[in-house]
Image (cartoon, rainbow, N blue to C red):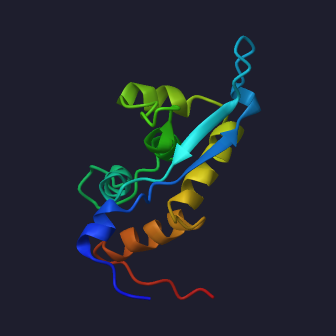
Amino acid sequence: MGLLTKQQILNARDIQTEDVPVPEWADAESGNDTVRVRTLTGRERDRYSTSLVSKDGKNSLDLNDMMAKLVAACAIDADGTKLFDHPAEVEALSQKSAVALARVHAVAQRLNGMAENALEVLAKNSEAGQPGSSPSTSA
């Protein structure tokens, strides 16, 4: 095995997709019942992470619509175009079945290398950055 060159890295096709059956969202007319989820680019992942930081200046987490934000960032059509681009669409998506949303969210997390306990890690990091906080000593 050798080292990759810059061009080999930049030319690599590293965006993966996975189709997720979502019977709760099935369309009776077309018979469609699947959502295609893809990995995020580095920039998209950073934007998603940033969207979870509260804008209150306290460096705390804002978990409102957390699942919908990730699903919106990862859900694409057959041509690879994002299904949800507008904040109002994320809001509408957040109003869908929690069971269905969680199923798609879990695949998006796995494809993007996000730990299931990512919220716990983010919360700990957020707490660690706050004045007067101390690390947890629980076992």
Q: Nearer the viewer, residue 112 or 11?
A: 11
Q: Please determine whether, in this image, residue 28 is positioned above or below residue 21.
A: above
Seen in the image, is 125 located left or right of residue 112?
Answer: left
Residue at image x 27%, y 49%? Answer: 55
Quarter of the image for residue 1 reads bottom left
Residue 90 spot, x, y in % from top left: 45, 32
Q: Please determine whether, in this image, residue 29 is positioned above or below residue 130.
A: above
Q: Please determine whether, in this image, residue 132 is positioned above or below residue 117.
A: below
Residue at image x 64%, y 43%? Answer: 19
Q: Nearer the viewer, residue 134 or 26?
A: 26
**Residue 85 visible in this rendered orientation of the protein:** yes
Quarter of the image for residue 102 reads top right
Residue 9 spot, x, y in % from top left: 32, 69
Instruction: Give the quadrant of the C terminus.
Output: bottom right
Residue 24 spot, x, y in % from top left: 74, 29
Residue at image x 37%, y 51%? Answer: 48
